[in-house]
Each structure stands twice: as structure tokens, then as C-alpha cells.
Image (cartoon, rainbow, N blue to C red):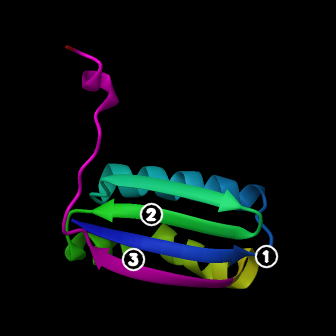
Amino acid sequence: MFVVIFRATARALDADYAATAAHLRELALRDFGCLEFLAVTEGEQEIALSYWPDEASIRAWKQQADHLMAQRLGRERWYSDYRVEIAEVRRRYQRDTVHSNRR
């Protein structure tokens, strides 16, 4: 499994941004194999984590037409700077709160 880490400084996040982000999230999860997508904004800083089964899925997503348009709009309107990191998840574990209270 791989994670794409997107970090950016927002310039101006408008209604078009919100609609585009919602559309892209749904598209990535539904049609491109994205396993999970989380985004958080604090002040001008945004970080988004998307989890993918393999690098081929990430490459396909990077070339998707709506995503390419959003990348262009991000550079032109929404972000003053950004960076993308891709990492392989070597280990993952979690506490299951649903079952941890059972005796």
C-alpha cells in the first residue's frame, strides 16, 4: 500500500474549490482504487492523505482529466505553494474500538 501526502498553503479556497475537491475525492475512491482519503485544513495550511493499493493506481489518477484540470487550477488560483510526497506503507495497525469493549 502507498500513501500520497499532499501539503499546500492556501491562497484562496472558494466555492469552486470545495465542489472540485468533493468531486475528485468521490471519483478517486469510486473509480481509481483509492482506499482512503483524509484532508485537514488549519489556517492556510492543508494536508491531504490518500491511500492507494499500488503505484500504477497513483499514476492513473495523476493523469485523470478532472484531476489534471484541478492541478492547473490549484497552481493558478487556490495554492501559493504545494508539495507531494509518495511513500510506501510498510506497517499499519490500529485499535478497533468497536470490539475492544467486548469481554
The nearer-to-camera label among 1 and 3 is 1
Give yes or no for residue 85 being in the magenta stretch.
yes
Marks 2 and 1, the one that precedes in the sequence = 1
Question: Depth-wise, is mark 2 or mark 3 nearer the camera?
Answer: 2
Q: Quadrant of the N terminus?
A: bottom left
Q: Is residue 92 visible?
A: yes
Instruction: From the top left corner, tell me how far across and down residue 63 is, in percent.
Output: 38, 78
Residue underneath mark 3: 62
- In the image, is residue 32 above or below residue 67? above
* Label 1 Cα neighbours within 10 Å, binned few <14 / some 14-19 / many ≥20: some
| Nearer-N-terminus badge (1/3) | 1
Q: Note whether residue 64 is visible.
A: no
Residue type at tag 1: Arg
**Of 1 and 70, which appears nearest the observer?**
1
Q: Do the residues labelled 2 and 3 touch (CB within 8 Å)?
A: no
Q: Which residue is drawn at 27% across and 57% down?
A: 33
The residue at 57%/51% (across/down) is: 22
Q: Is mark 3 on a helix, strand or loop?
A: helix
Give the residue drawn at x 80%, y 70%. 12
Q: Provide the residue span drawn in magenta.
A: 81-102
Q: Which amino acid, mark 2?
A: Leu
Per the model, the C-alpha gap separating discs 2 and 3 is 14 Å
From the viewer's perspective, tell me whether residue 76 is left or right of residue 36. Answer: right
Numbered label attached to residue 49: 2
Whether 23 is among the magenta residues is: no
Q: Which mark is residue 11?
A: 1
Q: In which quarter of the image is the C terminus?
A: top left
